[in-house]
Amino acid sequence: MKIPSSELPKQSSGAIYHLNLFPEDIADNIILVGDPGRVPMISAHFDSIELKKSNRELYTHTGVKNGKRVSAISTGMGTDNIEIVMTELDALANVDLEKMQVKPTHHQLNIVRIGTSGALNAEIKPGTEVASKYGVGFDGLLQFYEHSGIDNEDVVRAFVDYTGWNEKLPYPYCVAGSETLLDKVAFDMYQGVTATAPGFFAPQGRQVRGKLMFPELKQNIEGFEYQGFRFANMEMECAALYGLSRIYDHRALTCCLAIANRVTGEFIDDYHSLMDDLIEKVLIRM
């Protein structure tokens, strides 16, 4: 079946619309970051760089590290951007963009997101590398996709019951990351459950001038525990990445520096060297 151009648009050059990339521009091993400025941080570790492209906040550097081809791509912040990037990456790998048809054989990508987060557990000190075994989304993105079989519904029901989840909020979802990448990349990192919020302030329990509708929510998230599930940290992309990676059959993992602890109030603002160490570690192990 041919995909209409309105559903998967391309630029006049033939490049996929938002990423401004052709299939040959991406490697099988991809590192995603939110901040465009972090892309050159990653490519500085490459042995050679073959490609630099950008469009809006979406920057791509593809090169070689230790004989392995790698792409570093910025997504910007939030699950809406993750949906665009993941869908277009999958299309680059699995859609014939000239015929606008799905290819007969599936091509799987390895995708690791590197970012920052706030710890939700007092034992996680700022500067700790946290790998996400599961992502729990509060953004509602996955509810727009048919996703039976990938959502850990028992955990979601327990969480909804524990928190008294308000019906006005998007219904949560819980998806596991890639066990293969978790064992390969994050075997020595703190491993836990990551909460994905649809914003930085009120959705994460931060009040500045606007009053919170659900001021108890952050404390309820911190206190939730169910059959070994306990939240380690909170950020804005992981759950959508995991959900879409399962839908498109790619491997995905999120590795974040905890730069703040929301329980103890600790925060580190100079984490450049720690981020650089995490980047090198992921590049070597992917």
Image (cartoon, rainbow, N blue to C red):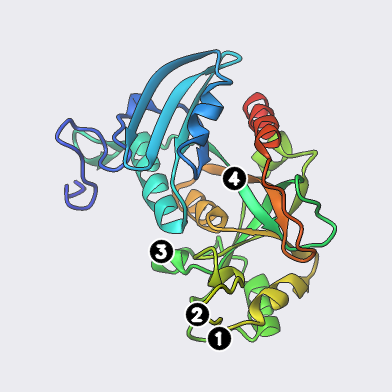
| 70, above or below 201, in the image | above
**For the residue marked with disc 4, what is the amino acid?**
Gly
Q: Which residue is mark 1?
A: 166
Residue 104 appears in the rendering: no
Q: Which residue is mark 4?
A: 115
| 32, above or below 63, in the image | below
Which circle marks residue 145 in the picture?
3
Look at 77% across and 39% down and name the residue there.
187
**Who is closer to the viewer here, 41 or 187?**
41
Query: Percent from the top left, x then y, of residue 147?
Result: 47, 63
Q: Quadrant of the C terminus?
A: top right
Which circle marks residue 169 in the picture?
2
Look at 59% across and 83% down and name the residue there.
214
Give the spatial CA distance, label 3 vs label 2.
Answer: 18 Å
Residue ranking furthest to the left: 12
Query: Percent from the top left, x then y, of residue 145?
Result: 40, 64
Task: Mark 3 or mark 2: name the one nearer the start of the chain.
Answer: 3
**For the residue marked with disc 1, what is the amino acid?**
Asn
* Few, some or many residues within 10 Å of mark 4 (<14, 14–19, 20+): many
Task: Mark 1 or mark 3: name the one nearer the start of the chain.
Answer: 3
Give the spatial CA distance, label 4 vs label 1.
Answer: 29 Å
SS for callout 3: loop
Query: Percent from the top left, x then y, of residue 247?
Result: 46, 53
Query: Percent from the top left, x then y, of residue 280?
Result: 66, 27
